[in-house]
Amino acid sequence: MFYETGRNASVGEENTVYIGQKPTMNYVLAVVTQFNNGCSEVTIKARGRAISRAVDVAEIVRHRFIQEAAVRDIKIETEVLKGEGGSTANVSSIEIYMSR
């Protein structure tokens, strides 16, 4: 299940920002806040149509707010989700690892 920042974050995921349907700047603020609170690494995660918003968030943070932030790694994958009635759907996902 994908959750947005602050909701149901499990241990070890306090420096993870989940991208959803909110405006891009909301997520930029979440990433910048994580860095300003002392995190040296922040992970941005998104699935499906939110992938382009995740890339936008990473680029806005890097170019406008925290110039010393860098993209350390990017992981992409396809998740197979089972729907009602036994059907399956392929959903792309991305994880962008940023460090200061």
Image (tube, helix red, strand yellow):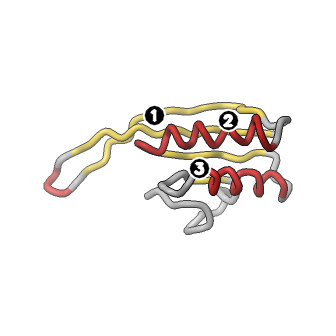
Q: Residue at x 31, y 47 (%)?
A: 81
Res 26 quadrant in image: bottom right
Q: Secondary structure at mark 3?
A: helix
Q: Give the residue type that dot 2 points to.
A: Glu
User: Which residue does the numbered mark 2 point to in the structure image?
Assistant: 59
User: Which residue does the numbered mark 1 point to in the structure image?
Assistant: 77
Lateral position of residue 33 relative to residue 45, left or right = right
Q: Secondary structure at mark 2?
A: helix
How far across and down, in percent of the image, does residue 65 sit?
A: 79, 44
99 or 63: nearer the eye?
Answer: 63
- Locate the N terminus and report the quarter of the image it occupies: bottom left
Most extreme residue toward the left, as rendered?
Answer: 85
What whole-number distance in Å separates the C-alpha atoms at marks 2 and 3? 11 Å
Q: Residue at x 62, y 66 (%)?
A: 6
What whole-number distance in Å separates the C-alpha atoms at marks 1 and 3? 22 Å
Q: Pointer 2: residues within 10 angstroms few (<14), some, or many (20+)?
A: some
Q: Pointer 3: residues within 10 angstroms few (<14), some, or many (20+)?
A: some
Q: Nearer the viewer, mark 1 or mark 2?
A: 2
Chain-order first, disc 1 or disc 3: 3
What whole-number distance in Å separates the C-alpha atoms at marks 1 and 2? 20 Å
How far across and down, in percent of the image, does residue 83 sit?
A: 23, 53
Q: Nearer the viewer, mark 1 or mark 3?
A: 3
41 or 21: nearer the eye?
Answer: 21
